[in-house]
Amino acid sequence: DSGGTTIYITDDGVGMKQEQVTAINEYASGSVSSTPTGMHVGMKNVIDRLRLIYGTDTTLQISSTRELGTFVCLTIPHSAETKQ
């Protein structure tokens, strides 16, 4: 048990470029603090909002294969206190 709620999102679309996936995963993991090259502002806003609402223990991980689709794994810890 990860101690949280995990949400899986998949699609069978065109997929994402590896540079975009890497940029999103680096930002989401906290290994970079500024918006990496290749990452769009919308994804940055989603990650920032998740951290703001659910805390920094929230994780988001993306994998994608061109022409096959994208897989997103989002985990929100049970201990997260929402600020609503």
Image (cartoon, helix red, strand yellow):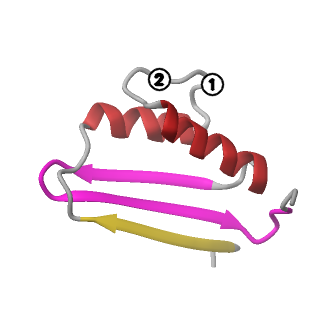
SS of the residue under disc 1: loop
Residue 22's disc number? none
Instruction: Specify few, some or many for label 1: CA neighbours under 10 Å numbering under 14, 14-19, or 20 or more.
Output: few
Q: Quadrant of residue 10?
A: bottom left
Instruction: State the quadrant of the N terminus.
Output: bottom right
Residue that mark 1 sits on: 33
Residue ID at (47%, 52%): 61
Instruction: State the quadrant of the C terminus.
Output: bottom right
Pick whichever, 10 or 59, lies toward us.
Answer: 10
Task: From the top left corner, tell me how far across and down residue 34 is, in percent.
Answer: 59, 21
Q: Residue furthest left?
A: 67
Residue 36's disc number? 2
Pick whichever, 52 or 6, lies toward us.
Answer: 52
Task: From the top left corner, tell me how far across and down residue 7 is, in percent.
Answer: 52, 71
Q: Is 6 situated above or below 70?
A: below
Q: What is the three-letter code of the residue carrying label 1?
A: Ser
Task: From the top left corner, tell me how far across and down residue 23 is, in percent.
Answer: 42, 32
Marks 2 and 1 sit apart, C-alpha to C-alpha, by: 8 Å
Q: Quadrant of residue 29?
A: top right
Pick whichever, 2 or 41, lies toward us.
Answer: 41
Secondary structure mostly seen in the magenta stretch: strand
Task: From the top left corner, tell me how far across and down residue 15 is, in percent.
Answer: 22, 50
- Asked whether 61 falls inside the magenta stretch, the response is yes
SS of the residue under disc 2: loop
Q: Quadrant of residue 80?
A: bottom right
Q: Which residues are magenta?
A: 59-81
Q: Is residue 76 left or right of residue 38?
A: right
Instruction: Specify few, some or many for label 2: CA neighbours under 10 Å numbering under 14, 14-19, or 20 or more.
Output: some
